[in-house]
Amino acid sequence: MTLTLHVDGERWRSHLRGTAELYDGIIPVIKGNGYGFGNRALARRADWLGADTVAVGTYAELIDVLPRFGGDVHVLTPWRPFWTDTIRPERMYDPRVVHTVSRIEDLAPMRAEAPEGTRIVVEGETAMARHGVDQHALTSVADELGDLVLLGFSIHLPLSEANLAEADRWAAVFEASKLAPRVTGTPVFTVSHLSDREVRALAERRPGLRVRPRVGTALWLGDRGAFRVTGVVTDRHVVERGERIGYRQRPMPVGGTVLIVSGGTSHGIGLEAPSSAVTLKQRATSVAKGSLGAAGLALSPFLVAGKQRWFVEPPHMQASMILVPSGTAVPEVGEEVELDVRMTTTTFDVVDLP
């Protein structure tokens, strides 16, 4: 059974080059499942793009990225004294690693543990309220740096239309703080979730900073037309209305054909993040889906004859059972069926990238 990500290689590479040209000083983000491609593949691709720095989500991801990328690797998850429980100190403190500091209380244990020359950026607490130092505490951070090498400042922004204003405010706070003079050379100011135009506008407003955008989704997944996902039909069975099938022996609501298609929970099929519905339409859709789910019905990501088809029951570990109603053309065993999946939550058996 194979779930395959087919990539139009030339189209994808053209998109990567174009995006890298749009964002001056781009820092490609490589994390999680590698946006469907895998972190190892993206590390090699970032090298191909000529990037001098990439960002990873966690220290554990250094294991895959450091051997395959020749530049610096910025760890976005802030340093904590317990991360050496999950990664060897020699990997964690590789000279090419740039650490994030988000709490004053971490500086003393970091100075005691980290080797001489360890490089850091300080993160400010934005409206995200995830990690970061409060703007009023930057003086205390400067006083506690010791011999840690400060490269600059970092912020992680929400998905908001006010991002440029918040980024500019933090840039001003950093430039006016005691931190800025501690940087040798031009301070780096790394930001997330700004458009290429916003990055340019911020750089023009703050010529004393080297503004560097961290870009993940817009880089790797910005051209969805370059990708096609398929599963393979491994079996099919004609069923009658009311017939009970599957693990849960649910009665079929209509007659038709049940397809057994590769792709299940181990691939991320049928798994989804909590709803981020904001508008009334989005909320109504969530309510409708919830009602159908309560009735034992759920749309699958599998497309047959141009339409999403219903799961017969929740996906199995490596395959899914899909109901195709009577009167619809049914693919043969061995044929591929397309899926519409979220790349950041899907693990593919094969990435076909020529």
Image (cartoon, grey):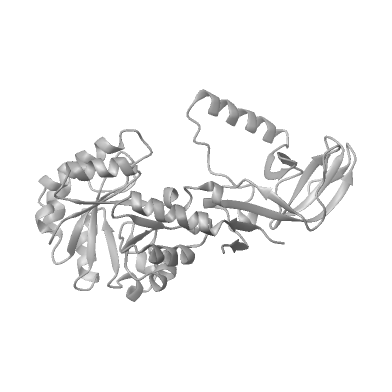
Q: Is residue 324 left or right of residue 273?
A: right
Q: Is residue 16 left or right of residue 98?
A: right
Q: Residue at x 37, y 74 (%)?
A: 88
Image quadrant in which the C terminus is located: bottom right
Nearest to the observer: residue 141 or residue 307: 307
Quadrant of the image occupied by residue 334:
bottom right
Residue 134 position, x and y percent, is 21, 44
Is residue 263 visible to the viewer in this orientation of the structure?
no
Q: Is residue 325 left or right of residue 294?
A: right
- Can you say whether 180 is above or below 244 in the image? below
Is residue 284 visible to the viewer in this orientation of the structure?
yes
Tally the numbered discs.
0
Nearest to the observer: residue 352 or residue 90: 352
Nearest to the observer: residue 349 or residue 275: 349
Residue projecting furthest to the top: 280
Q: Residue at x 9, y 55 (%)?
A: 181
Residue 348 position, x and y percent, is 60, 59
Q: Residue at x 17, y 65 (%)?
A: 148
Q: Residue at x 88, y 37 (%)?
A: 242
Quadrant of the image occupied by residue 56:
bottom left
Residue 36 position, x and y percent, is 53, 56
Image quadrant in which the N terminus is located: bottom right
Residue 256 position, x and y percent, is 86, 40
